[in-house]
Image: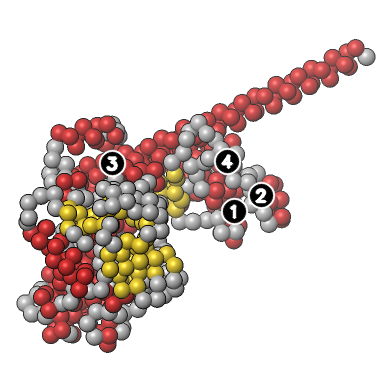
Amino acid sequence: MAMEVDTEVDDFVTKSQTFVSWLGKSGVTISDKIQLADLRSKGAGRGVVAQADIVEDELLFTVPRTSILSPEISSLPNDITSGLDDPWLALILTMVYEHQQGGGSKWQPYLDILPEEFDTLMFWDEDVLQFLKGSAVLSKIGKESADESFTTHLLPIIRANAIAFKDIDVSDSELLALCHRMASTIMAYAFDLPSQDGPTSEQEDGWEVDSNASTAATPKGMIPLADLLNANADLNNAKLYHTPDAVEMRSIKPIAAGDEVLNDYGALPRADLLRRYGYLTDEYAKYDVVEVAEDLIFLPASKTLDLSTTALQERLDYLEEHDVLDTAYDIAHCDPKDLSTSPFPEELTTALNTLALSAQDFRTLKTKSKLTRPDPSEKTCELLREMLERRGGLYLHSMTHLDKKEIEDIKKKHDYLNGPFKRRLMAFEVLCGEKEVLAEAQGWVLKRSKQWLEAGYNKRQAEEKAEGERKGKKGRK
């Protein structure tokens, strides 16, 4: 595997060449149809590019399990990690250990090409994070909980094994920063390592949020080369597969010579793309959502509907029994002119339809132990409109004038990739995307409300016509 170079030889290129050489010595087999490329001119760092045409389901490279950086393969003694049930913490500790070994680590050529700095939200200053005000992504950063977890679980292990970790003259704050760096590396690069054969599952969120109990124990690992594939939601052309002794990257469609080999993150909103990977791309704009917390929905709705506290709780309890309630709901992109595709999850509209029922209709529903249809009723449309207004009011109002064109103009006028505007502009892009979702949802609700009004008008017209005909027949008699 050659290293394609777009610029003069520098430290970046030297590290890449050393890494490619290390891959061969580590048992990684690579098709001669691909090469590691320097994509810095495109703002993408390293990537993998096809040197020749590739057909569908062609093997691109194979990484033996013995070359995957994981707690099981690392030279870190097992008794040191045995007390860690969380696979994320175990992998963080493993990577800290390998980093501390320096040239004595088997993995040094691999670790040398991994980033030392990140644009993920974990590393943003508070004065820049405030430009994301209104986005639910702010509540998912979890720096404080990560600090507590590292301080409670990892630092004591490192201090208790000072010789193994070579932590002489390393302060707690330096160790904590190293833990964050390795955690962010894992967030951006690690893969799940399921024991069964088949394609990888989508990587779940890590240590900064609560993991689902059923997936929290899935082992994690750093897979050299596989993690250097960049991602594109529209142009994804490769997928990672597991075998008992190795992992294989295969093409899932033909790839032309000169095209980049691309993985995919799944349906990830750009806010989460920024949180987990530290960059944005328009290819994921279609997955943008606006998260609406329950406190902006049900209590305000009950006031509009004039429901008593008792009546509201009774209906919420009923919805909870039927697995309809959630702590938050995602609003997605939609075509405001197409009422057949709702931007709202069915659970949300079903819940609001239930709250909007008359007392008698709710008793009937409860007796039958059924749920309402998800199509929003006329009253629910009003509740949705009010909910969207409340949600929109949470955003930073000084940014409401920004649109896509203005953001692109700012990028052209400034050194976007390296300048001080980079993080601020990424925040602007996230909020503009979310506000676009809100605007589409508002348009959809308006059209659905008009449909209800027209239906009511037509019904009244039909009733008046029928009444007139009835009276006319009476008069003729």
The reply, left or right, for residue 457 in relation to residue 98 is right
Q: Residue at x 45, y 56 (%)?
A: 327
How far is the residue under mark 4 from the one under mark 3? Answer: 31 Å
The disc, 2 or 1, on the residue closer to the chain's N-terminal end is 1
Amino acid type at image mark 3 = Glu
Eye-nearest disc, 1 or 3: 3
Q: CA distance from mark 3 to mark 2?
A: 43 Å
Spot occupied by residue 363 in the image (x, y as percentages of width and height) = 69, 51
All told, the count of numbered labels is: 4
SS at mark 3 in the image = helix
Give SS at disc 4. Answer: loop
Residue type at mark 2? Phe
Q: CA distance from mark 2 to mark 1?
A: 8 Å
- 41 w.r.t. 172: above or below: above
Choose top left, top right, bottom left or bottom right for residue 452: top right
Q: Which residue is mark 4?
A: 376
Question: Pointer 4: residues within 10 angstroms few (<14), some, or many (20+)?
Answer: many
Marks 4 and 2, Cα distance to the nearest angstrom?
16 Å
Q: Label 4 amino acid? A: Pro
Badge 3: residue crowd in 10 Å (few <14, some 14–19, many ≥20): many
Q: In front of the other: label 4 or label 2?
A: 4
- According to the picture, the residue beneath numbered tag 3 turns out to be 429
Tell me what residue is drawn at x 34 percent, y 44 percent. 283
Residue that badge 1 annotates: 315
Reading the chain from its start, which is encountered first: label 1 or label 4?
1
Q: Looking at the picture, how far across and down is residue 238, in whole percent?
A: 36, 56
Q: Quadrant of the C terminus?
A: top right
Q: Which residue lies at the image location 28% right of the left edge and 41% below the top edge?
A: 429
Disc 4, disc 3: CB below 8 Å?
Answer: no
